[in-house]
Image (cartoon, rainbow, N blue to C red):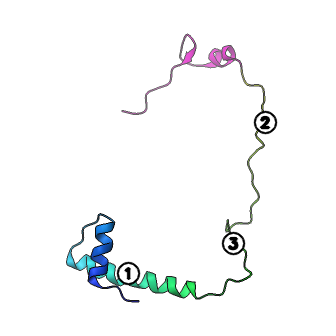
Amino acid sequence: MELSKEDVIKIAILSKLEFNDDEIENFRSDLSEILNYMNELNELDTEGISPLFNVLDLDDVTRKDEVRDSLKQEEVLKNAPDKDENFIIVPKIIG
């Protein structure tokens, strides 16, 4: 499948992008290659192949969501380097 210059211009308009003539030609070529590759993939027989959700064979490593006791406010504030009544004061990092 070869895209025309008009196809690329239409895609650019839909994408709200602007290209000069050289860029349009580069994208025409690149997008045509991508679409040709997608057509090749669509021709593959995937009958009986289960979907792949993760390329790594990992189990879920997150912990169970269990209610646990947390620290008391006084304990946290006792170790805070700078505090104001019931709040920990932290350095400003966003300008």
Q: Gap between marks 1 and 2, in whole Å?
A: 51 Å
Q: Secondary structure at mark 1?
A: helix
Q: Which residue is mark 2?
A: 66
Identify which residue, 27 or 49, lies in the foreground.
49
* Horizontal and vertical percent position of residue 60: 75, 54
Q: Amino acid at mark 2?
A: Glu
- Identified at 51% across, 20% down, the residue is 89
Identify which residue, 88 or 9, lies in the foreground.
9
Which of the marked residues, 3 or 1, is nearer the chain's N terminus?
1
Q: Which residue is mark 3?
A: 51
Q: Amino acid at mark 1?
A: Asp
In this rendering, would 36 be left or right of 50?
left
Q: Is residue 68 magenta?
A: no
Residue 64 sits above or below residue 52 on the image: above
Which of the marked residues, 3 or 2, is nearer the chain's N terminus?
3
Residue 81 sits above or below residue 25 on the image: above
Image quarter of residue 77: top right
In this rendering, would 36 be left or right of 95?
right
- The circle drawn on residue 30 is 1
Image quarter of residue 9: bottom left
In this rendering, would 9 be left or right of 67?
left
* Horizontal and vertical percent position of residue 11: 33, 73
Q: From this viewpoint, which residue is outermost toward the top?
A: 85
Q: From this viewpoint, which residue is outermost toward the left?
A: 21
Q: Dot 1 surroundings within 10 Å: few (below 14), some, or many (20 or more)? A: some
Residues rendered magenta in the picture: 72-95
Which of the marked residues, 1 or 2, is nearer the chain's N terminus?
1
Residue 45 sits above or below residue 65 on the image: below
